[in-house]
Amino acid sequence: MNCLDKAVAALLIVYNVIIITLYILFNDVNFTEVGKVTTVVTHLAAIPPLIITKSCKSLLFWMILLTTISSTLYHMAQVGWLGDELLETGWYIPSDHPLRRIDHGFSIALVFLVSVTIWYDIIPTLWIFLVTFVLMSISVAYINTVFIFPIREWISLVIIIIDFFVLWREKLDNKDKKILWLGFFVFIVSAAFYAVPTRQEWEWYSHSAWHVNVFSSIYIILRAQGEIPQFIRQPRLDTI
């Protein structure tokens, strides 16, 4: 493990332990104001994956950077740092605000692209760009559409299922499967923090834990790669 690995591991373990401990022991306490700060500041967890993708300037680097910027701006607006008035929802912007749409579009695209690094060899290059665009468009256009769960959560579930079967069945050249499984597990934890309902006063904390865990899972999955994919190599199967 290098210094960056240790920093990511320490942040992940310490932050999760703190959030879970606080929720168990002080669930009835309103920490809203502190939570608003954490939901913005935890975007700093994006620094490690940005560092390891910076040298190759791949599509992943720009997607991580744009996702981080859009999410930071959205949450700054959501908690009222950009000067809007408090709504009944507890937010300072409506649920269909353009910043929220952009944030969710980039987030879904990033989750898909990181997953593609696991199973890239079995799909054509062109499909990566087309599917990324389609998933972003669906997430932006149908942000408040719900079929039991929101559309974005269905998309994430499908990606998770594909990840699981690829990790379980495929022979992945030049990749460390044990580290990939660890990254996959951390992503499941991040999804739990995102999806499991909590009291409104604790929503900021659970969402900040989503930031820490999802960016850490991205870092771990990319560290399992022998190289950071450029998404311009010849796929193994062109006929799929």
Image: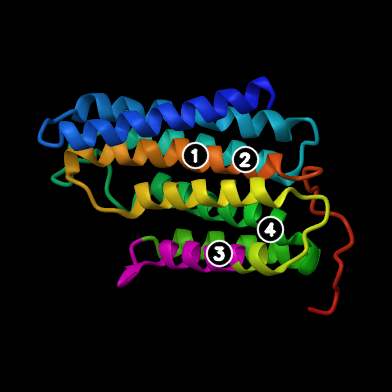
In the picture, the quarter occupied by the C terminus is: bottom right
Disc 1 residue type (three-letter): Ser
Q: Determine the residue positioned at 49% across, 39% down.
A: 70
Q: Nearer the viewer, mark 1 or mark 4?
A: 4
- Residue in front for this viewpoint, 143 or 56: 56
Earlier residue among tags 4 and 3: 4
Q: What residue is drawn where x is 52% and y is 69%?
A: 158
Amino acid at circle 3 = Ile
Residue 57 relative to residue 208: left or right:
right
To which residue does mark 4 refer?
A: 116
In 3D space, how far apart are the residues under numbered discs 1 and 2 (Cα atoms)?
22 Å
Q: Nearer the viewer, residue 152 or 227?
A: 227
Q: What is the distance, in whole Å, between disc 2 and disc 3 at their CAs?
A: 17 Å
Check disc 1 and report its element: helix, strand or loop: helix
* Amino acid type at image mark 2: Ile
The residue positioned 15% from the left and 31% from the top of the image is 26
| Precedes in sequence: disc 1 or disc 2 | 1
Instruction: Name the residue at 41% across, 42% down.
Output: 210
Give the alpha-carbon distance from disc 3 to disc 1, as whole Å: 22 Å
Question: Between tags 3 and 1, which lies in front?
Answer: 3
The main secondary structure of the magenta stretch is: helix
Q: Which residue is mark 2?
A: 220
**Mark 2 burial class by Cα count in 10 Å: few <14, some 14-19, many 20+:** many
Q: Position of residue 184 (x, y in %)?
A: 56, 52
User: Image check: 233 left or right of 68?
Assistant: right
Which residue is denoted by mark 1 in the rendering? Answer: 70
Q: Residue furthest right?
A: 234
